[in-house]
Amino acid sequence: MTTPSGSVLDWYPPMSPISIAVLAVGMSIDSLLASVGGGASLRRQCRFCDAILVGAVFAIVQMITPLVGWAAGAAASSYVASFDHWLAFGLLTLVGGRMVLLAFRAEEEGAPETSFIGTPVTLVMTAIGTSIDAMAVGVSLAFVKANIVVIVAAIGATTFLMSAGGVMMGRLIGNRFGRSAEVVGGLVLIGLGCLILREHLLA
C-alpha cells in the first residue's frame, strides 16, 4: 500500500531519542523486578559476577525477542498476541513457585538453591518470561519509522544496567531478611506473571 507521498510508513513519525529511552526503560521494568527477587533469594554470597551474568542474560534475551517480532511483522502479530501472555505467566509462575517451595527447605542439608540465578535453566526461563512482551513490541516497530538496531541496543543496555543493579539491590534485602526474602522473591515472580496475564486478558 502506498500514498501520494510514497510508502504508507511515511505517515508515521520517526521515534525520537526520548521515545526510545522511555521504551527501553519500560521494557526493562519486568527484568528489574525479577532481578531484585532473584538477588533477594540467592543463598550464596552474591558476587559482582552474579549481577553481571544476570544483566547479560536478561539483556541478550530482551534484545532477541523484539528482533524476532520485528522480523515477523504483521504476519505474526495475531499469533504472538494469542499466546505471549500465557507463556510469560507459565514461565514466571513455574520459576517463582519453585523458589517459594525450595525456600522452606533452606534448613535441610544439601537443599538446592532457591534463586533462579543459581541454575542456568531457570535463569534463561526467567529471562524469557520477562521479555515475551518485547516480541509484540517488535511487531509494532515494524510499522513505524524506527531504527531497530538503535532501539534494540538501547533496550539491551538499559536492561543490563537495571537487572544487574536489581540483583545487588535484592541481595541487600536478602542479607537482612533471610528466608523471608527468598519467599518474597518467588512471590514477586508469580505476581509479575499474574500481572502480565491480567493486563492482556483485560486489554
Image (spheres, rainbow, N blue to C red):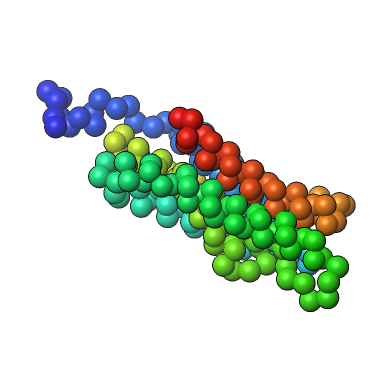
Quarter the C terminus occupies: top left
Considering every residue shown, the one lying at the far top of the view is 4
Drawn side of residue 124 relative to residue 1, left or right: right
In the image, taking residue 108 as reference, residue 71 lies left or right, namely left
Image quadrant holding the N terminus, namely: top left
x and y percentages locating residue 160 in the rendered image: 58, 52
Give the x, y percent position of residue 30. 58, 44
Q: Where is residue 128 in the image (x, y as percent from the top left)?
A: 50, 55
From what the image shows, is residue 81 above or below residue 54? above
Is 12 situated left or right of 165 in this image?
Answer: left
Q: In this view, does 171 lie to the left or right of 120?
A: right
Residue 132 placement (x, y as % from top left): 47, 48
Reply above or below: 153 against 17: below
Q: Does residue 131 appear anywhere in the picture?
A: no
In the figure, residue 52 lies in which quadrant? bottom right
Q: Which residue is drawn at 13% across and 30% down?
A: 2
Residue 91 in view here: yes
Q: Residue furthest bottom?
A: 110
Q: Which of 178 and 7 is in front in this view?
A: 178
Q: Nearer the viewer, residue 72 or 4?
A: 72
Q: Which residue occupies 42% across, 52% down?
A: 65
* Vertical order, 156 against 44 (above or below): above
**Residue drawn at x 23%, y 28% as measured from the top left:** 10
Q: How many labels does the image show?
A: 0
Q: Residue at x 47, y 44 (%)?
A: 85
